[in-house]
Amino acid sequence: MRPVIPYVTAALLFGLGGYGVLRRRNAVLVLMAVELMLNAVNLILVTADTTVRAQLPHSGQVFALFVIVLAAAEIGVGLAIVLQLYRLRASVTVDDVPLTEPPGAVPAGATAGPASPPSGGPATDAPEGEK
Amino acid sequence: MTGADVLLLALGAVAVGAAALVVGTRHLVRAGLWLVVCLGALAGDYLVLTAELVAWVQVLIYVGAVVVLLLFAVMLTRAPIGASADLDRPGWPAALIGGGSGLGLAVLLVHAFRWSRVDLPAAGTADRLGEQVFRSWVLPFELLSVLLLAALVGAIVLSRVDIGRPGAPHGRRRPAGGPPARPEPAGAMATVAEEGGRG
């Protein structure tokens, strides 16, 4: 087995993933590109398990399993954030997220979002309006 | 070139080609489906590299769960069927950084390994990997389970609308909670922003 073949595959996958993260505007596609980068790291770990004779056998494969679990956790939280963003702004374009907006200014847009009816009055009618 | 090399080359070509389509296609749903092809080819790579358990876990968790979640999110965000024109931003910096890191790493690894060959070790069956996980790596394993639990609870809290919002149950219990309910949104949104920063 020539280890250079899977190593180069992993390097190219990592480059493609990085390209996708920087290029894409849709948050779900950004998450897909992140998955590509994580898989490149997994391929490196599994290949290194065959080339490096470590003290503990199969350490690379154990680490690959750990990375898969981390990716599952990451995708769960990431998709929750993406869906919350969609609920707040009706769009998942990462370019449109204002990073400099003060946190107090966001809920005004949140209560006047697409799902809730416009409530121009004071906050007393907010509980009925939300439910 | 042995049979394993030919298989690795073919599966690697499929994986890289499918990955290029994932980051290049204009159809949101097709990107998810090409991701399935890429991850499946990688699972084949793991099988050739004698990592049996990792290959099947890859098929189960990545192809079975992660891609389904991603497609689920594509549907929930009302993605259009067909090509979308505004998926990409201008690509020069991305191509520069992605191509630079990918090709640079490839050159580095080719320089390090040349055309050397190694013998494949004993297969990483569930038996052997389980022994390693539950003997040498048991503390990271338990930590990971706690982390997974925390991440999933966090995801649930993030997606529930009625936790820590103005219309939350504790706000509703107040009689005519007008002015006291005002400081609530800042705190709630700060928590969301903090979670986003960490994720």
Image (cartoon, coloured by chain):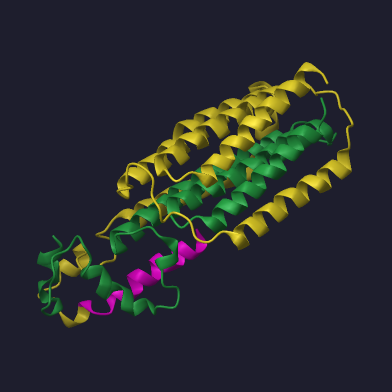
Chain colours: A green, B yellow
Q: Please provide percent x and percent y for residue B172.
A: 15, 67
Task: Locate the N terminus of chain B by quadrant.
Answer: top right
Q: Please provide percent x and percent y for residue A126.
A: 14, 70
Q: Please provide percent x and percent y for residue A104.
A: 33, 79
Indicate whether residue A102 is drawn in magenta. no
| Residue at horizontal 77 percent and vertical 17 percent from the top | B3
| Residue at horizontal 72 percent and vertical 27 percent from the top | B9
| Residue at horizontal 35 percent and vertical 70 percent from the top | B189
Q: Is residue A32 left or right of residue A47?
A: left
- Residue toward you, B118 or B27: B27
- Residue toward you, B178 or A67: A67
Please report the bounds of the magenta region as a residue range: B181-199
- Residue toward you, B166 or B93: B93
| Residue at horizontal 32 percent and vertical 57 percent from the top | A86
Indicate whether residue B191 is drawn in magenta. yes
Q: Is residue B5 left or right of residue B23?
A: right
Q: Is residue B144 left or right of residue B65?
A: right
